[in-house]
Image (cartoon, rainbow, N blue to C red):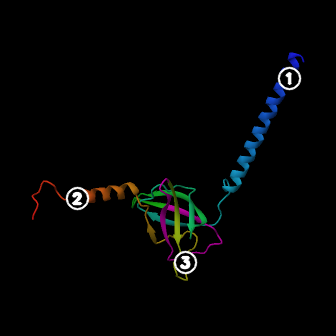
Amino acid sequence: MCKACLDMQRNFIETLLGAVVLVTAILFLTYSTKTGNVGSSSGGYPIYAEFSEIGGLKPGDEVRISGVKSGSVAAITLIPESFLASVEIRVDSTVKLPKDTSSRISSESLLGGTFLALDPGGEEELLKSGDRIRYNQDAQNLERLLGQFIFSMQQSKPDDSAPQQP
């Protein structure tokens, strides 16, 4: 075979493989955006919660009720007067929450990842769009807890230099 024919055949194969890789990448991107609900407008109604410590919570994080995704964190702003973080929560419009619902910021695992958990109460009156959740539990700072534990262990350790009582 001629050298030009071999070069043309090689170029065709390389072009074909490039197209296959490109199509595969587009399929994966489409699948991931559909399963991850990326770009979908989270409808529902807004409610608010105030925290003194939000940890790693950020807009877009999940809001869960009994472990089931029921909304998302829409925005986080600082309230200048109280220096608290105001968290706007978008709750699915099919979910009706009692007025005595509480919220807490939880970790998914030790490796990171946070979500906002809502614990519905028992009141008959329901939260309306724009209402504030009254009972909120801040994020637990693992480094601070570990530091307190280590510090308390050092204080409770008996002093070896003191004379021992028989």
Seen in the image, is 15 located left or right of residue 61?
Answer: right
The secondary structure type at the circle numbered 2 is helix
Q: Position of residue 115 (x, y in %)?
A: 53, 61
Q: Which of marks 3 and 2 is nearer the N terminus?
A: 3
Q: Dot 2: few (<14), some (14–19), or many (≥20) neighbours within 10 Å?
A: few
Q: Quadrant of the N terminus?
A: top right
Answer whether labels 1 and 2 touch (C-beta < 8 Å): no
Q: Start and end of the magenta stretch?
A: 87-111
Camera-near label (3 vs 2) is 2
Report the amino acid beneath label 2.
Answer: Gln
Report the amino acid beneath label 3.
Answer: Pro
Furthest toward the right, the residue is 1
Residue 155 image label: 2
Residue 8 image label: 1
Q: Dot 1: few (<14), some (14–19), or many (≥20) neighbours within 10 Å?
A: few
> Is-magenta flag for residue 107?
yes
The secondary structure type at the circle numbered 1 is helix
Residue closest to the eye, 89 or 66: 66
Which residue lies at the image location 44% right of the left edge and 61% below the top edge?
Answer: 139
Does residue 100 sit above or below 79 in this rendering? below
Disc 3/disc 2 C-alpha distance (Å): 45 Å
Seen in the image, is 97 located left or right of residue 51?
Answer: right
Report the amino acid beneath label 1.
Answer: Met
Camera-near label (1 vs 3) is 1
Q: Position of residue 121 (x, y in %)?
A: 51, 78
Mark 3, residue position: 98
Q: Earlier in the sequence, mark 1 or mark 2?
A: 1
Q: In which quarter of the image is the C terminus?
A: bottom left
